[in-house]
């Protein structure tokens, strides 16, 4: 079953948080704000892992899920209550927190075989990464395989032509700029949100997920 994000924005006006709506979205229905309340709704599990540790074990979250804010706007409180039983892992970030995170790197961990280890060494970014031991076991359930230290993998890469049927796998750790994880979120979405107030401290992003 897939997982989706429900991403909302609030602005502090006269000391009170007020829900904001995306002015760039034209609502095709007769129900105002049905669609414009969602500022970001793409399904990106790497981003979900970065924001709240949801659906991705390779990446360290920016922060542990914080729950919904105690002073959340009344309209978002009603929205959250409507999702009771289905919505999960609520959290929030201030706009300055997200802008700071956009310009940083995140650390990833995962498992790769010889082929993808070679790509990782050539480019600095691996492909076809397996997130944990269980995923490794499932991927190679019908093939002989062995998890080895990275130093040993370096040796196997050089002698690949002489290896037998066993698939060798190693765990790697690498960094990637956060802004490359869903450029639509970090660039287009945040740039729209920035326009809401000259003081980014007056902006807060609240979100949760559903399966």
Image (spheres, rainbow, N blue to C red):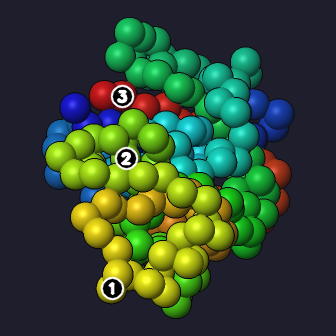
Residue 210 circle label? 3
Q: Spatial distance from mark 3 to mark 1, Cα to Cα? A: 47 Å
Residue density around tag 3, few if under 14, some if 14–19, many if 20 or more, within 10 Å? some
Q: Earlier in the sequence, mark 2 or mark 1?
A: 2
User: Residue 148's image quarter?
Assistant: bottom right
Horizontal arrangement in the rendering, residue 164 relative to residue 63 (left or right)? left
Q: Which residue is mark 1?
A: 161
Q: Are marks 2 and 1 in contact (CB under 8 Å)?
A: no
Q: Earlier in the sequence, mark 3 or mark 1?
A: 1
Horizontal arrangement in the rendering, residue 100 relative to residue 34 (left or right)? right
Q: Which residue is mark 2?
A: 136
Provide residue 166's location: percent of width, then percent of height. 31, 60
Provide residue 86's location: percent of width, then percent of height. 35, 16
Q: Is residue 182 above or below residue 53?
A: below
User: Residue 176's image quarter?
Assistant: bottom right
Q: Are marks 3 and 2 in contact (CB under 8 Å)?
A: no
Viewer can see residue 190: no
Provide residue 35's location: percent of width, then percent of height. 31, 45
Local SS, label 3: strand
Local SS, label 1: helix
**Residue at (55%, 19%) from the top-left corner?**
77
Viewer can see residue 144: yes
**Residue at (51%, 66%) from the top-left corner?**
181
Residue density around tag 2, few if under 14, some if 14–19, many if 20 or more, within 10 Å? many
Q: Spatial distance from mark 2 to mark 1, Cα to Cα? A: 23 Å
User: Residue 116's image quarter?
Assistant: bottom left
Q: Earlier in the sequence, mark 3 or mark 2?
A: 2
């Amino acid at each position: 079953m897939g997982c989706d994000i429900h991403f909302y924005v609030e602005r502090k006006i006269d000391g009170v948080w007020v829900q904001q709506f995306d002015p760039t979205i034209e609502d095709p229905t007769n129900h105002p704000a049905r669609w414009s309340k969602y500022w970001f709704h793409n399904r990106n599990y790497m981003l979900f892992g970065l924001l709240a540790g949801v659906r991705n074990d390779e990446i360290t979250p920016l922060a542990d899920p914080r729950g919904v804010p105690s002073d959340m706007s009344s309209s978002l409180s009603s929205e959250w209550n409507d999702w009771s039983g289905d919505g999960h892992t609520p959290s929030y970030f201030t706009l300055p927190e997200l802008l700071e995170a956009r310009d940083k790197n995140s650390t990833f961990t995962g498992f790769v075989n010889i082929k993808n280890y070679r790509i990782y060494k050539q480019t600095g970014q691996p492909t076809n990464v397996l997130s944990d031991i269980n995923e490794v076991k499932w991927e190679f359930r019908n093939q002989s395989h062995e998890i080895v230290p990275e130093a040993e993998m370096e040796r196997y890469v050089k002698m690949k032509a002489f290896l037998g049927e066993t698939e060798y796998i190693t765990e790697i750790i690498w960094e990637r700029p956060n802004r490359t994880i869903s450029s639509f979120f970090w660039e287009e979405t945040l740039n729209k949100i920035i326009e809401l107030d000259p003081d980014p401290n007056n902006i807060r992003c609240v979100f949760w997920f559903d399966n």
